[in-house]
Amino acid sequence: MRYSVRWVVLLALGTCVACASIGSKFDFENRTKLALGRTTEAQAIELLGEPRKTASLSNQDGNFEHFQYLYSYGDLGGAAARVLFLEFKAGVLNAYSYASGFKEDSTEFDYDASAKVTAGKSKKQEVLKLLGEPTGKARCPSYQGDYVGKFKGATEIWLWAHTSKSKGLDKKSIKSMNVFVSFDVRGVVRDVSRSKDE
């Protein structure tokens, strides 16, 4: 299940612009209780509910389980979606990423502030001060769609992702922005990747 948050949100919004809903509501607010290296699969299900989709992957790096949660709602006023991906390695949370365009839990962030993050210099605390809590984190290696193949040699990757609500039935009004920051073993930034729909 190598779907990225952005891809799934755009697909859900594009499909849902003229319909009522896709997926089912889940306990999105409990995402803040997820902890890399500590949360188990059973604990995640207890916090969030049953995932919409699951997938398994085994390779030279170990055994991985992927969970997908999705809820999208649309009417003539527009459509919004919230999505959450979890990846477990050997039964423990290895990566997560989420985004929401709903007003009550929007994942908007200060995209322009990400230009101040400096490879080889900025540290985790500085990045948190600039951008706030990330909408995703991964231990490397990760095979969750948002992180696959990103930043070889990093020990951890953080993600900030937001996809806006559509304006009415206009699918072209849906805009996304993403920032990926990778860290070395000392917690210093290795690489920064930014993208934004204009």
Image: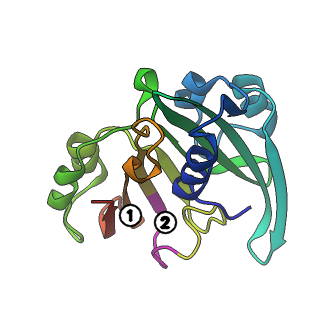
Residue position for label 2: 155
**Vertical position of residue 91 compared to residue 178: above or below:** above
Query: Residue 49's x, y, as percent?
Result: 77, 26
Is tag 2's residue or tag 1's residue first in the polypeptide sequence?
2
- Most frequent secondary structure within the magenta stretch: loop
Q: Which residue is mark 1?
A: 183
Q: Amino acid at mark 1?
A: Phe
* Residue drawn at point x = 60 percent, y = 37 percent: 18
Left or right: residue 50 versus residue 138 is right
Where residue 72 sits, quadrant-wise, is top right
What residue span does the magenta drawing correspond to?
A: 150-157
User: Of the numbered discs in the image, which one, if any, rests on residue 62?
Assistant: none
SS label for mark 1: strand
> Label 2 neighbourhood size at 10 Å, few (<14), some (14-19), many (20+)?
some
The answer to whether residue 143 is left or right of residue 126 is: right
Q: Quadrant of the C terminus?
A: bottom left
